[in-house]
Image (cartoon, helix red, strand yellow):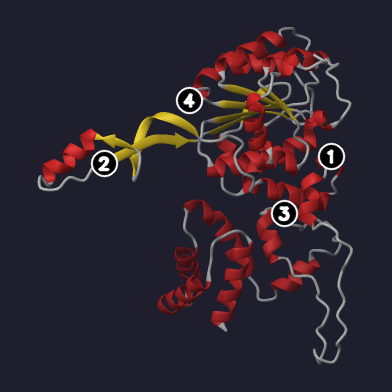
């Protein structure tokens, strides 16, 4: 009975995002036999030592442990949560659970029962509608027209997209099986073994350049900004040198908020830090603040700047073109991602768009998962294309 409960608990942790395999279930059962079941904290410590790898997984494990081992009738309690409640004087506010943990603890949908005799029915039906799957259909769906379920799935898929920049060649070298001869390393080997000559070779080191994201969180960019936050959070998990800033009426550094591996915790920290979400837009003032306070610190080593905004500026202060030109001189590459570019008849009629456009290196759409997935290829393909300022409607 204990082994079955441990296996079920491991499935919950695996559905919540932790790498818990069958081997850890066997070790967990052995650990419980050693510590016994007299004290609850001993059981928690034994399972935590076996089923977690990093310190940041501990909050998710503790929440799953408290929810799973509190009551054997957990499924009935989860179903009771769906019924309407009357809030009274004695109602106690519970701590909010992580979305991943809630999905892992949720009961599975009822499946149709299998036939008693599988061989009784010989009729085989094929679905010939030739429709795309949910993931393939969401690749081209606009974020603005998605339902809430589709938007949640798209946000999770955005976490897995590749980085938008390609590795760049550095002046420093690294060891390699083939490449240029390294005379110093070769002589060092001969000093240890004078009778043998094993030449050492090196090659130029390649690494991803830093990525700086300036994200517009105004009212017109609400849905696009939320998906972009998931995208940037996925980049921050796989690429250490990612700096993110949110701007609406003022500039806010959200880099540290996105360092948490749990996307729910990271986005909740961003929501608590950004005070001008879903408000107005002052692009000129925010770019001036970034150039004055943050550009020298984060722009370096061929850093690429991703400016995610629709360009609809409501700033009364002039100087957007000057601040954009100053940002372009400090950055290795300035890429403007605009969701309005998805329209075929798009024309830069807004004053903010006309002020920004001559100072960017790339001008690309970002309105669905396909545009995010093809961002790296689009940047490489646009390297040989003319600058946006040479387009006919500029």
Q: Give the image location of residue 163, x and y in percent.
A: 59, 39
Classify mark 3: helix, strand or loop. loop
Q: Mark 3 against mark 2, which lies toward the viewer?
A: 2
In what quadrant of the picture does the N terminus appear? Answer: bottom right
* Residue at which label 3 appears: 93
* Residue at which label 2 appears: 200
* Residue at which label 1 appears: 144
Q: Residues within 10 Å of mark 2 (few under 14, many from 20)?
A: many
Classify mark 4: helix, strand or loop. loop
In the picture, residue 268 is in which quadrant?
Answer: top right
Q: Residue 373 versus residue 159: which sits nearer the camera?
A: 373
Classify mark 1: helix, strand or loop. helix
Classify mark 2: helix, strand or loop. strand
Q: Mark 4 against mark 2, which lies toward the viewer?
A: 2
* Residue at which label 4 appears: 301
The mark nearer the N terminus, 4 or 1, is 1
In this rendering, the answer to whether 218 lies above or below 179 is above
Q: Residues within 10 Å of mark 3 (few under 14, many from 20)?
A: few
The mark nearer the N terminus, 4 or 3, is 3
Q: Give the image location of residue 189, x and y in percent.
A: 17, 43
The mark nearer the N terminus, 1 or 3, is 3
């Amino acid at each position: 009975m204990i082994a079955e409960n441990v296996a079920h608990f491991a499935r919950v942790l695996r559905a919540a995002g932790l790498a818990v395999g069958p081997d850890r279930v066997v070790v967990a059962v052995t650990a419980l036999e050693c510590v016994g079941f007299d004290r609850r904290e001993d059981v928690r410590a034994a399972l935590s030592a076996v089923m977690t790898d990093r310190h940041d997984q501990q909050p998710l494990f503790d929440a799953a442990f408290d929810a799973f081992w509190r009551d054997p009738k957990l499924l009935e309690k989860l179903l009771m949560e769906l019924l309407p409640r009357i809030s009274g004087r004695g109602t106690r506010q519970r701590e909010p659970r992580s979305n991943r943990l809630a999905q892992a603890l949720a009961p599975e949908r009822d499946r149709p029962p299998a036939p008693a005799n599988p061989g009784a029915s010989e009729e085989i039906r094929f679905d010939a509608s030739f429709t795309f799957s949910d993931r393939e259909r969401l690749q081209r769906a606009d974020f603005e027209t998605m339902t809430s379920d589709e938007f949640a799935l798209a946000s999770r898929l955005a976490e897995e997209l590749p980085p938008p920049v390609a590795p760049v060649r550095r002046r420093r070298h690294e060891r390699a099986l083939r490449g240029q001869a390294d005379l110093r390393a070769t002589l060092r080997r001969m000093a240890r073994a004078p009778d043998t000559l094993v030449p050492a070779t090196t090659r130029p080191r390649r690494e991803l350049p830093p990525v700086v994201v300036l994200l517009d969180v105004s009212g017109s960019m609400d849905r696009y900004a939320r998906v972009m936050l998931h995208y940037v959070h996925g980049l921050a998990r796989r690429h250490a040198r990612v700096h993110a800033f949110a701007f609406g009426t003022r500039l806010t550094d959200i880099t540290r908020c996105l360092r948490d591996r749990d996307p729910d915790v990271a986005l909740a920290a961003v929501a608590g830090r950004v005070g001008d979400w879903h408000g107005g837009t002052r692009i000129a003032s925010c770019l001036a603040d970034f150039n004055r306070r943050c550009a020298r610190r984060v722009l370096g080593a061929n850093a690429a700047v991703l400016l995610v905004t629709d360009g609809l500026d409501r700033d009364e202060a002039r100087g957007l073109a000057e601040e954009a030109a100053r940002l372009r001189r400090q950055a290795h590459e300035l890429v403007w991602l605009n969701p309005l570019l998805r329209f075929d008849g798009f024309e830069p009629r807004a004053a903010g768009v006309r002020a920004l456009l001559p100072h960017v290196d790339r001008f690309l759409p970002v309105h669905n998962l396909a545009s995010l997935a093809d961002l790296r290829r689009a940047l490489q393909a646009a390297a040989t294309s003319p600058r946006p300022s040479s387009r006919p409607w500029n």
